Protein backbone atom coordinates (compact mmCIF):
# COMPACT_ATOMS: atom_id res chain seq x y z
CA UNK A 1 0.00 0.00 0.00
CA UNK A 2 3.04 2.24 -0.54
CA UNK A 3 3.05 3.95 -3.93
CA UNK A 4 6.05 3.27 -6.10
CA UNK A 5 6.99 6.96 -6.25
CA UNK A 6 6.92 7.47 -2.47
CA UNK A 7 10.24 7.77 -0.63
CA UNK A 8 10.04 5.83 2.63
CA UNK A 9 13.04 5.15 4.84
CA UNK A 10 13.54 1.46 5.61
CA UNK A 11 14.11 2.47 9.23
CA UNK A 12 10.67 4.08 9.62
CA UNK A 13 8.21 2.06 11.69
CA UNK A 14 5.06 1.62 9.63
CA UNK A 15 1.96 -0.06 11.12
CA UNK A 16 -0.47 -2.38 9.40
CA UNK A 17 -2.78 -1.18 6.63
CA UNK A 18 -1.01 2.16 6.23
CA UNK A 19 -1.44 3.87 2.84
CA UNK A 20 1.32 6.11 1.53
CA UNK A 21 0.48 8.00 -1.64
CA UNK A 22 2.46 9.22 -4.63
CA UNK A 23 5.56 11.33 -3.96
CA UNK A 24 5.07 11.27 -0.19
CA UNK A 25 8.24 11.34 1.93
CA UNK A 26 8.74 9.47 5.22
CA UNK A 27 12.08 9.99 6.96
CA UNK A 28 13.84 7.41 9.13
CA UNK A 29 12.96 8.40 12.70
CA UNK A 30 9.21 8.13 12.12
CA UNK A 31 6.44 5.95 13.54
CA UNK A 32 3.06 5.62 11.86
CA UNK A 33 0.19 3.72 13.49
CA UNK A 34 -2.08 1.21 11.82
CA UNK A 35 -4.78 2.34 9.43
CA UNK A 36 -3.29 5.79 8.81
CA UNK A 37 -3.19 7.34 5.34
CA UNK A 38 -0.69 9.75 3.81
CA UNK A 39 -1.92 11.56 0.72
CA UNK A 40 0.34 12.49 -2.19
CA UNK A 41 3.20 14.93 -1.57
CA UNK A 42 2.85 14.81 2.22
CA UNK A 43 6.09 14.95 4.22
CA UNK A 44 6.63 13.17 7.54
CA UNK A 45 9.96 14.20 9.00
CA UNK A 46 12.26 12.84 11.68
CA UNK A 47 10.68 12.87 15.11
CA UNK A 48 7.11 12.44 13.87
CA UNK A 49 4.95 10.04 15.89
CA UNK A 50 1.64 9.45 14.13
CA UNK A 51 -1.13 7.46 15.81
CA UNK A 52 -3.65 5.07 14.32
CA UNK A 53 -6.27 6.02 11.72
CA UNK A 54 -4.73 9.44 11.12
CA UNK A 55 -5.42 11.17 7.79
CA UNK A 56 -2.52 13.26 6.46
CA UNK A 57 -3.54 15.44 3.52
CA UNK A 58 -1.68 16.66 0.46
CA UNK A 59 1.40 18.80 1.17
CA UNK A 60 1.07 18.43 4.94
CA UNK A 61 4.39 18.61 6.81
CA UNK A 62 4.64 16.90 10.21
CA UNK A 63 7.78 17.26 12.32
CA UNK A 64 9.27 20.24 10.52
CA UNK A 65 12.07 22.09 12.31
CA UNK A 66 10.89 24.62 14.91
CA UNK A 67 10.80 28.18 13.65
CA UNK A 68 13.34 29.19 16.27
CA UNK A 69 16.62 30.81 15.21
CA UNK A 70 18.46 29.29 18.17
CA UNK A 71 17.34 25.70 17.61
CA UNK A 72 19.95 23.01 16.98
CA UNK A 73 18.49 20.55 14.41
CA UNK A 74 20.45 17.72 16.08
CA UNK A 75 18.33 18.06 19.24
CA UNK A 76 16.06 14.98 19.60
CA UNK A 77 12.48 16.27 19.73
CA UNK A 78 9.11 15.06 18.49
CA UNK A 79 5.76 15.90 16.92
CA UNK A 80 2.99 13.61 18.15
CA UNK A 81 -0.34 13.21 16.33
CA UNK A 82 -3.17 11.50 18.23
CA UNK A 83 -5.37 8.70 16.94
CA UNK A 84 -8.12 9.62 14.52
CA UNK A 85 -6.84 13.13 13.81
CA UNK A 86 -7.20 14.63 10.33
CA UNK A 87 -4.80 17.14 8.82
CA UNK A 88 -5.98 18.79 5.63
CA UNK A 89 -4.06 20.25 2.71
CA UNK A 90 -0.89 22.13 3.59
CA UNK A 91 -1.24 21.98 7.39
CA UNK A 92 2.05 22.09 9.31
CA UNK A 93 3.05 20.82 12.75
CA UNK A 94 6.57 21.64 13.98
CA UNK A 95 8.47 19.46 16.41
CA UNK A 96 9.48 20.73 19.85
CA UNK A 97 12.57 22.70 20.86
CA UNK A 98 13.41 21.25 24.27
CA UNK A 99 15.43 18.00 24.32
CA UNK A 100 13.09 14.97 24.26
CA UNK A 101 10.12 17.35 24.24
CA UNK A 102 7.04 16.98 22.05
CA UNK A 103 4.55 19.08 20.18
CA UNK A 104 1.30 17.23 20.83
CA UNK A 105 -1.92 17.12 18.83
CA UNK A 106 -4.60 15.18 20.73
CA UNK A 107 -6.97 12.53 19.45
CA UNK A 108 -9.67 13.28 16.87
CA UNK A 109 -8.52 16.81 16.14
CA UNK A 110 -9.22 18.46 12.79
CA UNK A 111 -6.61 20.79 11.32
CA UNK A 112 -8.01 22.45 8.19
CA UNK A 113 -6.07 23.66 5.16
CA UNK A 114 -2.92 25.72 5.74
CA UNK A 115 -3.32 25.78 9.53
CA UNK A 116 -0.11 25.84 11.56
CA UNK A 117 0.84 24.50 14.99
CA UNK A 118 4.18 25.75 16.27
CA UNK A 119 6.80 24.07 18.40
CA UNK A 120 6.08 22.79 21.92
CA UNK A 121 2.31 23.28 21.65
CA UNK A 122 -0.18 20.97 23.32
CA UNK A 123 -3.68 20.54 21.85
CA UNK A 124 -6.30 18.49 23.64
CA UNK A 125 -8.85 16.18 22.04
CA UNK A 126 -11.42 17.23 19.43
CA UNK A 127 -9.72 20.59 18.77
CA UNK A 128 -10.61 22.20 15.42
CA UNK A 129 -8.38 24.71 13.64
CA UNK A 130 -10.07 26.33 10.65
CA UNK A 131 -8.25 27.39 7.48
CA UNK A 132 -5.03 29.38 7.97
CA UNK A 133 -5.33 29.38 11.77
CA UNK A 134 -1.95 30.14 13.35
CA UNK A 135 -0.76 28.78 16.70
CA UNK A 136 2.61 30.06 17.92
CA UNK A 137 5.06 28.16 20.10
CA UNK A 138 4.33 26.87 23.62
CA UNK A 139 0.57 27.41 23.31
CA UNK A 140 -1.90 25.15 25.13
CA UNK A 141 -5.41 24.61 23.73
CA UNK A 142 -7.99 22.69 25.73
CA UNK A 143 -10.20 19.92 24.37
CA UNK A 144 -13.30 20.73 22.30
CA UNK A 145 -12.05 24.21 21.39
CA UNK A 146 -12.56 25.76 17.96
CA UNK A 147 -10.28 28.31 16.30
CA UNK A 148 -11.73 30.34 13.44
CA UNK A 149 -10.09 30.89 10.07
CA UNK A 150 -7.14 33.27 9.99
CA UNK A 151 -7.01 33.62 13.78
CA UNK A 152 -3.65 33.81 15.52
CA UNK A 153 -2.51 32.92 19.04
CA UNK A 154 0.58 34.50 20.60
CA UNK A 155 3.26 32.23 22.03
CA UNK A 156 2.91 30.93 25.60
CA UNK A 157 -0.83 31.59 25.70
CA UNK A 158 -3.32 29.18 27.24
CA UNK A 159 -6.72 28.54 25.70
CA UNK A 160 -9.16 26.74 28.00
CA UNK A 161 -11.38 23.84 27.01
CA UNK A 162 -14.54 24.44 25.02
CA UNK A 163 -13.46 27.88 23.78
CA UNK A 164 -14.77 29.39 20.53
CA UNK A 165 -12.28 31.76 18.86
CA UNK A 166 -13.69 33.93 16.09
CA UNK A 167 -12.19 34.20 12.63
CA UNK A 168 -9.22 36.58 12.27
CA UNK A 169 -9.01 37.04 16.04
CA UNK A 170 -5.69 38.09 17.57
CA UNK A 171 -5.15 36.35 20.91
CA UNK A 172 -2.38 37.57 23.21
CA UNK A 173 -3.91 36.74 26.61
CA UNK A 174 -5.15 33.57 28.29
CA UNK A 175 -8.74 32.66 27.39
CA UNK A 176 -10.87 31.10 30.11
CA UNK A 177 -12.64 27.77 29.48
CA UNK A 178 -16.11 27.63 27.91
CA UNK A 179 -15.96 31.21 26.60
CA UNK A 180 -16.19 32.94 23.22
CA UNK A 181 -13.55 35.44 22.08
CA UNK A 182 -13.15 37.58 18.98
CA UNK A 183 -11.11 40.44 17.57
CA UNK A 184 -8.28 41.28 20.00
CA UNK A 185 -8.88 39.43 23.28
CA UNK A 186 -12.52 40.53 23.47
CA UNK A 187 -14.70 38.08 25.37
CA UNK A 188 -18.32 37.73 24.28
CA UNK A 189 -19.85 35.52 26.93
CA UNK A 190 -20.00 31.77 27.35
CA UNK A 191 -19.94 29.28 24.49
CA UNK A 192 -23.48 28.14 25.24
CA UNK A 193 -23.90 26.21 22.01
CA UNK A 194 -20.81 24.17 22.77
CA UNK A 195 -21.92 23.53 26.36
CA UNK A 196 -25.33 22.31 25.25
CA UNK A 197 -23.83 20.07 22.59
CA UNK A 198 -21.76 18.47 25.34
CA UNK A 199 -24.98 18.01 27.33
CA UNK A 200 -23.99 20.20 30.27
CA UNK A 201 -27.02 20.63 32.53
CA UNK A 202 -28.89 23.92 32.92
CA UNK A 203 -27.90 24.19 36.57
CA UNK A 204 -24.23 23.81 35.76
CA UNK A 205 -24.50 26.36 32.92
CA UNK A 206 -26.14 28.80 35.35
CA UNK A 207 -23.26 28.29 37.77
CA UNK A 208 -20.81 29.02 34.96
CA UNK A 209 -22.69 32.22 34.11
CA UNK A 210 -22.40 33.37 37.72
CA UNK A 211 -18.67 32.58 37.83
CA UNK A 212 -18.09 34.28 34.48
CA UNK A 213 -19.74 37.50 35.66
CA UNK A 214 -18.04 37.50 39.05
CA UNK A 215 -14.54 36.80 37.74
CA UNK A 216 -14.35 38.29 34.26
CA UNK A 217 -16.82 41.18 34.39
CA UNK A 218 -17.00 42.53 37.93
CA UNK A 219 -13.76 41.45 39.61
CA UNK A 220 -10.78 43.75 40.14
CA UNK A 221 -8.49 40.82 41.00
CA UNK A 222 -9.27 37.86 38.78
CA UNK A 223 -7.06 35.28 40.51
CA UNK A 224 -8.20 36.24 43.99
CA UNK A 225 -11.89 36.19 43.09
CA UNK A 226 -11.57 32.81 41.37
CA UNK A 227 -9.74 31.36 44.38
CA UNK A 228 -12.44 32.60 46.76
CA UNK A 229 -15.25 31.15 44.63
CA UNK A 230 -13.48 27.79 44.51
CA UNK A 231 -13.80 27.50 48.27
CA UNK A 232 -17.59 27.73 48.09
CA UNK A 233 -20.29 25.74 46.34
CA UNK A 234 -18.85 26.41 42.87
CA UNK A 235 -15.88 24.24 43.72
CA UNK A 236 -18.28 21.28 43.88
CA UNK A 237 -19.76 21.88 40.41
CA UNK A 238 -17.57 20.18 37.79
CA UNK A 239 -17.58 22.77 34.98
CA UNK A 240 -17.47 25.73 37.36
CA UNK A 241 -14.54 24.15 39.21
CA UNK A 242 -12.56 23.67 35.97
CA UNK A 243 -13.38 27.25 34.95
CA UNK A 244 -12.13 28.66 38.25
CA UNK A 245 -9.04 26.46 38.45
CA UNK A 246 -7.88 27.90 35.11
CA UNK A 247 -7.01 31.16 36.88
CA UNK A 248 -4.56 29.50 39.27
CA UNK A 249 -1.88 29.67 36.56
CA UNK A 250 -0.92 31.93 33.70
CA UNK A 251 1.57 34.74 33.17
CA UNK A 252 0.15 36.67 30.23
CA UNK A 253 -2.98 38.05 31.85
CA UNK A 254 -6.58 37.07 31.15
CA UNK A 255 -8.96 38.30 28.50
CA UNK A 256 -11.82 40.18 30.20
CA UNK A 257 -15.39 40.95 29.30
CA UNK A 258 -16.69 44.51 28.93
CA UNK A 259 -18.79 45.64 31.90
CA UNK A 260 -21.76 46.40 29.66
Image: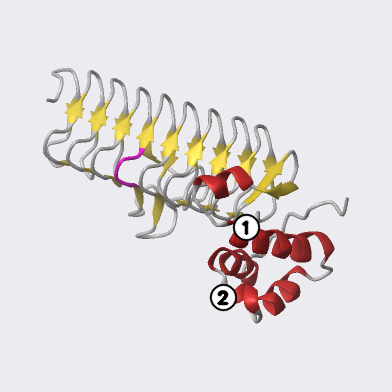
Q: Which mark is residue 100?
A: none
Find out whether residue 82 is within the magenta segment: yes
**Please, what secondary structure does the residue beneath circle 1 have?**
helix
Magenta residues, as a range? 81-85
Q: Can the viewer see residue 253?
A: no
Q: Quadrant of the N terminus?
A: top left
What residue is at 24 percent from the left and 38 percent from the top? 53
In the rendered picture of this protein, how many numbered marks are placed on residues?
2
Q: Can the viewer see residue 55?
A: yes
x and y percent of residue 155 in the render?
60, 50
166 is higher (above) or lower (below) than 156: above
Residue at the far right: name it.
260
Question: Which residue in the structure is indicated by mark 2?
Answer: 236
226 is higher (above) or lower (below) than 56: below
Residue 4 found in image quarter: top left
Quick check: marks 1 and 2 in contact, CB under 8 Å? no
Find out whether residue 73 is within the magenta segment: no
What residue is at 26 percent from the left and 24 percent from the top? 24
Structural crowding at the residue carrying mark 1, measured as other residues with C-alpha within 10 Å and reported as few (<14), some (14–19) or many (≥20): some
25 is higher (above) or lower (below) than 138: above
Query: How far apart, in angstroms, are the residues tagged by discs 1 and 2?
Result: 14 Å
Q: Main secondary structure of the magenta part?
A: loop
Which one is earlier in the sequence, the residue at label 1 or at label 2? 1
x and y percent of residue 198 in the render?
49, 49
x and y percent of residue 71 in the render?
46, 50
**158 relative to 56 in the view: left or right:** right
Q: Which mark is residue 205?
A: 1
What residue is at 64 percent from the left and 65 percent from the top? 250
Structural crowding at the residue carrying mark 2, measured as other residues with C-alpha within 10 Å and reported as few (<14), some (14–19) or many (≥20): few
What residue is at 25 percent from the left and 19 percent from the top? 23
Amino acid sequence: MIHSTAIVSPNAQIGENVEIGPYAIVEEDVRIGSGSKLESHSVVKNGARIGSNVSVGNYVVIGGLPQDLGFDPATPTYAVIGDGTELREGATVNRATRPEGSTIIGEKCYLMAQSHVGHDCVLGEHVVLANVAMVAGFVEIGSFSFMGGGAGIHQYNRIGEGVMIGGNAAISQDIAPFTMVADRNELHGLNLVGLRRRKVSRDHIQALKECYRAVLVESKNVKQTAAELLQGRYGRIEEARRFLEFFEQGKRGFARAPRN
